[in-house]
Every structure is written in structure tokens, then in C-alpha cells.
Image (spheres, rainbow, N blue to C red):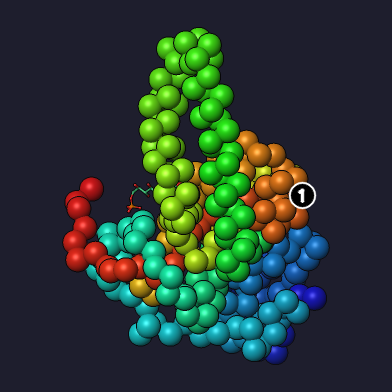
């Protein structure tokens, strides 16, 4: 339900200027009109800009509308320093990530923009050790199987000239396998939590929305002193593995695709410097 309280509406026209669905029509000398309210995308801009709180939207009751605390906003310099100092810190320890930090990381992800405000991004945290180990062993198993096929002499002779980049990665895969066999989890960088950011396969902007959520979450992780590493290696393995197995391992519905996965954990140390890019 959308409505305008005409008693307190000043007809300033701000709601009309910000509405992406062209719903409010405001004229200085006439009562405000709402057109095609079914087209509302639920972004809440109308409620956020109304200076007198005359704009009423059932999705945003009074307790869901907060005044921005401008004194808490970072300065451009401090935000830039956070952006510059964010690194993929892979020195993850077994120290648990405080629950409050995980909650803030999830909340940061939820506030990312989504196409047409469709908010189809799902956030799923994997924190139990058995599930983390299952992901790691499946990823390593997958790549070792691939390496064995690639190194089979007749295949190697035929394929190496065409797949040089892939063959150049084989020593790194072998080194990861060694680490795995010694009890480490190299493909997930020993993460103690995986944040699986997924969206329906049928949704056109899944990749964009999930990766915007990732970026919000990664900056929040950095500001909390929590390590985050993009799990591209895991994502590639999941892609090769196929939908059923990947969704079971990641704990997401088959109808969803993990467009971004974040490895999280408490680092052994923080960096004192960043290199200029
Ligand atoms: C799409 C993507 C995939 C990545 N995959 C991995 C990965 O599987 N493992 C890893 O350790 N780092 C991965 N990274 C992290 C990059 O290696 C890292 O961002 C890059 O080296 C720059 O370092 P920085 O993040 O510390 O600035 C990935 C990054 C991106 C954007």
C-alpha cells in the first residue's frame, strides 16, 4: 500500500524526482496523485526523501526508516584508505570469527544495490568444519582428476601446445595437493567460514548483483579486521562439478548459482603497507 498524507505533504516534488517507476505526480496547486502503484519496485526512495514523512509505504513502516547519522559516515580520505588497504590476506588462523563481525559482513552484503531492486541475492554461510572440509576435498579431488587426465602422456602430447596456460598451472595444483595431504585447506585458504552469494540461475543480473554484494561485504570484512579472499578456484571447481553436486556442497538450492564465494577468517597478522596501483 502506497499513500500520501495530503494534510502534511508540502508538494515539494522530491518523491516524484526520485521514483524510478514514475508513480507520484506532484503539482504545486493540486492534490498529489499516485499512478500505477503496482509498478512500485519497493526501493523506498519516496519514504527516504519525504521531508515531512507524508509519504506512506506499507513496506517501510516508521520503525524501518532511519535518519542517516552523517557524523558516522567515513570521510573520503578514510574510505579511500580502507579501499587501498583491503587485501586478500591468506594468513587465516583457526581463531573463530566473532559472530557480530559475521553479522555485519552479511548486513553489508544485503545493502548492495540489485537490478530493479529485485533483491534475489541469497547469502549462505558455511561455518561447520565438516562442510568446509567437504568443499576443500571435493575441489582438490576435482583438480587432481583433471591434472591426471592432462598428464596422461598421449593427451599431454596432443593438448599441451594448445593449452599452455592450463599446463603451466599443473605444478601449482600439485603443490596444493601436497598441502591438502598435510592437513591444510589450500583451495579455501584455510577459511573458517565461506560466504556463498547466490542468485536464481534464471535471473539475468545474478552475477552483477552477487558481486556487488561481495564488494560491500569485503570492505566491511576489511574494516573489521577479518580476512576475506575471493574463492575463484572453488567456483571453477563447482562449475566443472555440475549443478547437483555443487549445490549440495555449498548448501544452496539447485535453482540458484553461486556467482561469488568469499573465504573468511581471522588473519595471523595485518599488513602495515599497501603497494600503489
Ligand atoms: C574473480 C577472482 C577470483 C579469485 N580467486 C582466488 C582464489 O581462488 N584464491 C585466492 O587465493 N585468491 C583469489 N583471488 C584474489 C586475487 O588473487 C587478488 O584479489 C589479487 O591478487 C589482488 O590482491 P588483493 O585482493 O590483495 O588486492 C581472486 C580474485 C578475484 C577477483
- Decide if residue 43 is on the left or right side of residue 273: right
Quadrant position of residue 4: bottom right
SS type, badge 1: loop
Q: Residue at x 80, y 63 (%)?
A: 38
Residue shown at 35%/85% (left/top)? Answer: 71
Quarter assignment of residue 171: top left
The picture places residue 272, in percent across and down from the top left corner, at 19, 66
Is residue 117 in view?
no
Left or right for 135, reference 71: right
* 182 to 19, vertically: above or below: above
The residue wearing badge 1 is: 255
The residue sitting at 75% across, 45% down in the picture is 244
Residue at (60, 68) in percent of width and height: 128
Quadrant in which the N terminus appears? bottom right
- The front one of 16 and 201 is 201
Q: What x and y, as percent, mark residue 35?
A: 77, 64
Amino acid at each position: 500500500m502506497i499513500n500520501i498524507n495530503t494534510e502534511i505533504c508540502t508538494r515539494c516534488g522530491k518523491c516524484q524526482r526520485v521514483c524510478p517507476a514514475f508513480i507520484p505526480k506532484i503539482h504545486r496547486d493540486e492534490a498529489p496523485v499516485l499512478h500505477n502503484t503496482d509498478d512500485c519496485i519497493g526501493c523506498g526512495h519516496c519514504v527516504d526523501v519525504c521531508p515531512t514523512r507524508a509519504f506512506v509505504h506499507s513496506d517501510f513502516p516508521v520503525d524501518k526508516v532511519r535518519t542517516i547519522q552523517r557524523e558516522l559516515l567515513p570521510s573520503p580520505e578514510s574510505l579511500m584508505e580502507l579501499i587501498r588497504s583491503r587485501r586478500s590476506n591468506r594468513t587465516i588462523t583457526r581463531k573463530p570469527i566473532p559472530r557480530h563481525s559475521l553479522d555485519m559482513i552479511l548486513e553489508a552484503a544485503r545493502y548492495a544495490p540489485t537490478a530493479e531492486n529485485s533483491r534475489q541475492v541469497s547469502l549462505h554461510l558455511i561455518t561447520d568444519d565438516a562442510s568446509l572440509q567437504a568443499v576443500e576435498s571435493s575441489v582438490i579431488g576435482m583438480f587432481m582428476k583433471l591434472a591426471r587426465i592432462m598428464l596422461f602422456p598421449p593427451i599431454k602430447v596432443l593438448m599441451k601446445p594448445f593449452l599452455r596456460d592450463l599446463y603451466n598451472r599443473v605444478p601449482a595444483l600439485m603443490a596444493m595437493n601436497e598441502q591438502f595431504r598435510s592437513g591444510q585447506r589450500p583451495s579455501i585458504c584455510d577459511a573458517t567460514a565461506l560466504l556463498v552469494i547466490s542468485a536464481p540461475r534464471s535471473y539475468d543480473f545474478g552475477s552483477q548483483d552477487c558481486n556487488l554484494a561481495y564488494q560491500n561485504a569485503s570492505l566491511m570484512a576489511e574494516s573489521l579486521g577479518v580476512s576475506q579472499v575471493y574463492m575463484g578456484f572453488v567456483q571453477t571447481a563447482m562449475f566443472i562439478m555440475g549443478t547437483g553436486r555443487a549445490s549440495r556442497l555449498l548448501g544452496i538450492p539447485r535453482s540458484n548459482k553461486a556467482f561469488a564465494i568469499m573465504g573468511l577468517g581471522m588473519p595471523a597478522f595485518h599488513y602495515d603497507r599497501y603497494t600503489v596501483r
